[in-house]
RNA sequence: GGAGAGAUACCGAAGUGGCCAAACGGGGCAGACUGUAAAUCUGCUGGCUUAUGCCUUCGAUGGUUCGAAUCCAUCUCUCUCCA
């Protein structure tokens, strides 16, 4: 095992906030494997690069000999984390939660060390479901309303006239209670989890435990470079996405975002290259992480051919159509657009071409030859096959 | 429990009887320009077999009217002040 200071130096990289650094050093110096907690939401089985930031940090702990403790918040999900949300979430059935958890670890396994001695998984219903009202009130008495309202999301909602349910106050308490039960040494989270995780410290102190160290990772912005990466905003790159999509989407991020992606996703500084080269290097490295070396090289080659040289002849995606077809129907067959009105607009505005020739009449009929390339909008490029 | 304010499209926000599928801004999409970057300019932005056509949409349900996002009634939800 590496020395406490060596470990600390590694673990501090990319961290947004650490409560507290001294405590972490002390815990590391004790020389025993630490119990590192990470809570996960059983409602979001689609992991993306944003989640990977924290998961990669967890992996780092594992590699240093510590133990990952995952808490599936199945019971807390009944309430719904108020973070950034304002709607009560639908309840999930037990088997749905189980399935989500399986999917979660299947994806997280691309990053984590899944061996049993390095990973422990709990459902928080294991202990939370046992609590009666008296237990709950006792737990609630450990927190004040004023402190609760300090929390950013509550404060914002309160000021913005958005309702806050009293039950939502219980969420941080339940999550903090998890830390007490599993006796966590360190809890990981994104900045949005700061408050919740700090509550864990207080509850542990009250329970006579040494408080957990709270390690907060930054939230990764999404493809738009402004909002945090999230599925609902559609600005994400999923861990299971194809090499081509992963590469392409990475290329579309703004230059300004690159340094951040480099540090948070690759843990290395941006290379001093032409911005486009630096971005290709970034995209290449990311694809390699999730799909391997060969796939990364292929994705890069395909990207360069398609978009740099505008040579679509090697396009892999195909679409089977009959020879004579209305243009609108042809575009609809790609299945990538939400409505025919939408496609009609796309066509009228010159977004659709066949072998490079724009067609702007939505009513046009075309006779398709095998091997022709249909391009619709920026992202859809398919090779046509005649049935 | 009482008094008042409010709920409009993805978001913010106009609209107080017909000219409203609904101003404006943001976001999004597309085109030009590029490096599938940024910035800029332009267009579009409810749906439908494109139609000076029909359907759905201004919290919900009913009503008044030739005609309602707009008026009335009831309801639901939110906020503020008072008790």
Image (cartoon, grey):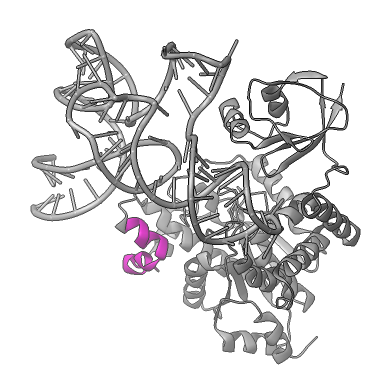
Depth check: give the residue in front, A8 or A136: A8
Depth check: give the residue in front, A310 or A44: A310
Q: Residue at x 77, y 64 (%)?
A: A280
Q: Residue at x 88, y 28 (%)?
A: A370
Instruction: Work out which quarter of the rendered image holds the N terminus of chain A and state it.
Output: bottom right
The image quadrant of residue B53 is top left
Vertically, is B16 above or below A241?
above
Instruction: Work out which quarter of the rendered image holds the C terminus of chain A and state it.
Output: top right
Q: Residue at x 70, y 44 (%)?
A: A379
Drawn side of residue A132 relative to residue A325, left or right: left
The stretch of residues the image draws in magenta is: A143-158
Vertically, is B58 above or below A204?
above
Drawn side of residue B10 relative to residue A160, left or right: right
Percent position of residue A181, x then y: 58, 66
Q: Residue at x 72, y 66 (%)?
A: A276
What type of secondary structure mainly makes up the magenta span? Answer: helix
Percent position of residue B36, x then y: 68, 55
Depth check: give the residue in front, A85 or A297: A297
Percent position of residue A341, x then y: 56, 27
Depth check: give the residue in front, A23 or B10: B10
């Amino acid at each position: 095992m590496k020395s406490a200071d060596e470990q600390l130096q590694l673990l501090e990289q990319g961290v947004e906030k650490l409560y507290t650094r001294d405590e972490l050093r002390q815990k590391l110096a004790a020389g025993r494997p630490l119990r590192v907690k990470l809570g996960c939401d059983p409602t979001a089985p689609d992991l993306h690069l944003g989640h990977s930031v924290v998961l990669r940090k967890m992996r780092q702990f594992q590699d240093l000999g510590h133990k990952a403790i995952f808490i599936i918040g199945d019971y807390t999900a009944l309430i719904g984390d108020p973070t950034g949300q304002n709607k009560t979430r639908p309840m999930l059935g037990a088997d749905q939660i189980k399935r989500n958890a399986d999917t979660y670890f299947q994806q997280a396994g691309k990053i984590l060390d899944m061996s049993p001695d390095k990973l422990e998984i709990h459902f928080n219903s294991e202990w939370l479901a046992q609590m009666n009202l008296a237990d709950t009130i006792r737990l609630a008495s450990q927190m004040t309303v004023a402190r609760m309202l300090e929390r950013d999301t509550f404060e914002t909602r309160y000021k913005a006239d958005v309702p806050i349910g009293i039950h939502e106050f219980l969420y941080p308490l339940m999550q903090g209670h998890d830390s007490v039960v599993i006796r966590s040494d360190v809890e990981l989270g994104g900045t949005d989890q700061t408050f919740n995780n700090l509550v864990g410290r207080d509850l542990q102190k009250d329970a006579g435990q040494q408080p957990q160290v709270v390690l907060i990772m930054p939230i990764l912005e999404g493809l738009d470079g402004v909002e945090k990466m999230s599925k609902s905003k559609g600005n994400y790159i999923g861990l299971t996405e194809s090499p081509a999509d992963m590469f392409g989407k990475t290329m579309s991020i703004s230059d300004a975002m690159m340094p951040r992606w480099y540090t948070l996703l690759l843990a290395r500084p941006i290379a001093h290259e032409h911005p486009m080269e630096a971005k290709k290097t970034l995209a290449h490295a990311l694809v390699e992480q999730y799909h391997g070396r060969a796939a990364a090289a292929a994705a890069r080659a395909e990207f360069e051919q398609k978009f740099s040289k505008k040579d679509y002849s090697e396009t892999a995606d195909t679409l089977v159509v009959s020879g004579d077809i209305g243009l609108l129907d042809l575009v609809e067959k790609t299945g990538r657009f939400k409505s025919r009105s939408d496609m009609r607009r796309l066509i009228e505005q010159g977004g659709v071409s066949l072998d490079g020739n724009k067609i702007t009449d939505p009513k046009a009929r075309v006779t398709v030859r095998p091997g022709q390339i249909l391009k619709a909008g920026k992202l859809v490029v398919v090779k046509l096959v005649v049935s």
